[in-house]
Image (cartoon, grey):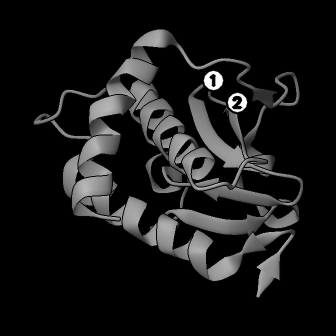
Amino acid sequence: MEVRGYKLLELYTILLCATSYINENFIFSNQNQIDDINYGLIVHAFLLSVFKDQGFSNFKLMHGKNLNAKEHFWLENEDTIIDLTAQKSLKVTTPLLLIPKKTYYQNHLLSINEKRLMLKSIPKEINQSIIPIKKVFYKDYY
């Protein structure tokens, strides 16, 4: 089965492995000292990098602010949203995986004055932090 040129099973496999890895190793807590903003940026930049490695290249890293000016990151393509940190800032209990853009809850929380912005480049320090994360991911989870 294909979804806009993607093999759905392969995409789900990557997502399940990535969420398992993130949940076991990078949950926001006092142990890992990742603040809220960097947590969202790091986990989505990591997933975007894995997608690109595996040939899923039309997802973009997005950034927005909700009505309380709290920053939030997610991935999206033409019609789909992947939000691994939805439960941290939205009133949901699980990550949002492959959600149609039309029904994405975050759309209703973004400030009217703030546009959703695609990050044109990922900060160098974030890219550097992803390298060892990906090594462990590919070795132990995928």
Q: Is residue 71 above or below residue 20?
A: above
Residue at image coords 64%, 57%: 82
Name the quadrant containing residue 61: top right
Q: Nearer the viewer, residue 113 or 6?
A: 6
The mark lying in front, picked from 1 and 2, is: 2
| Residue 88 shown left or right of residue 69 in the figure | left
On screen, residue 77 versus residue 135, left or right, reads right
Q: Nearer the viewer, residue 107 or 62?
A: 62
Q: Earlier in the sequence, mark 1 or mark 2?
A: 2
Quarter that holds the N terminus: bottom right
Give the label on residue 69, or none.
Answer: 1
What residue lies at 32% left-to-right and 54% top-to-bottom? 138
Locate residue 139 relative to residue 101 in the image: left or right: left
Q: Nearer the viewer, residue 44 or 104?
A: 44
Q: Secondary structure at mark 1?
A: loop
Tell me the amino acid under the disc marked 2: Gly
Query: Residue 18's x, y, as percent?
Result: 40, 59
Residue 133, how many percent across, how many down?
A: 30, 39
In the rendered view, tell whether residue 120 sits above or below residue 97. Answer: above
The residue beneath circle 2 is 64
Kind of residue at badge 1: Ala
Q: Position of residue 122 (x, y in %)?
A: 58, 20
